[in-house]
Every structure is written in structure tokens, then in C-alpha cells.
Amino acid sequence: DVEGGKSTPEMYLRSAKLLGTTPQETLVVEDALHCVQTAAAAGFLTAGVYDAAALPEEWQEMQRICTVSGENLLEILKTIQ
């Protein structure tokens, strides 16, 4: 329902609106650097999930940008509880 997909913040902003939340209270979970960059730039909390297909420098950048990151979603959820 939005143009630009995950490369623009519109998808994340619309999703938060539908959930009745703000970016500052919404955690976006992604495994791609460009998606994390877009969500973080729009003010969302971000969780970076490791993707074996990602280049090592992309994973390092995701870890730097993200509110929380981990090898898998279960690991991430344990750190935010």
C-alpha cells in the first residue's frame, strides 16, 4: 500500500500508525542493512538479525546502528525482556 517499499520510511510509518504506536515505541526487526538504516532514520527502535548472506562489514554496520542485534530473533528477544 506504499510506494518505495523498505527503502523509504513510509512503510514503517504506516505500519506504526495502523498499530497505534509511534516510531519511538516501535521495534522494527530486519535482516538487511538498508532496511535498518531507513527505519532508524525515521526514528524507530531497530533490531538487526544476522543474515549469513550479508557481507561482514554490513553486519558490523547493522550492529552499530541497531538498538539491539543478534544471531537470531530468540537471542534478541532475550536481551529486551
Image: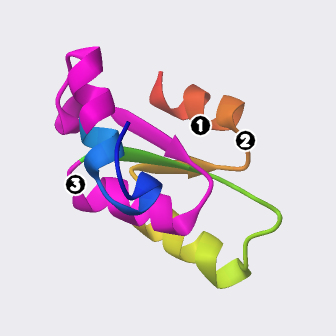
Residue 76 tag number: 1
Magenta segment, which residues?
A: 14-43
User: Which residue corresponds to mark 2?
Assistant: 72
Task: Name the N-terminal-most of marks 3 and 2.
Answer: 3
How far is mark 1 from mark 2, CA to CA?
A: 7 Å
How far is mark 3 from mark 2, CA to CA?
A: 24 Å
- Label 3 Cα neighbours within 10 Å, binned few <14 / some 14-19 / many ≥20: some
Residue 51 percent across, percent down from the top left: 75, 58
User: Which residue corresponds to mark 3?
Assistant: 42
Looking at numbered disc 3 in the image, what kind of residue is underneath it?
Ala
Residue 16 percent across, percent down from the top left: 27, 28
Looking at numbered disc 1 in the image, what kind of residue is underneath it?
Ile
Does the stretch in magenta take in 21?
Answer: yes
> Is residue 79 toward the left or the right of residue 46 in the image?
right
Q: Residue at x 55, y 51 (%)?
A: 69
Looking at numbered disc 2 in the image, what kind of residue is underneath it?
Asn
Q: Label 2: state its secondary structure.
A: loop
- Label 1 Cα neighbours within 10 Å, binned few <14 / some 14-19 / many ≥20: some
Instruction: Looking at the picture, tell me which residue is in the foreground, 9 or 1.
Output: 1
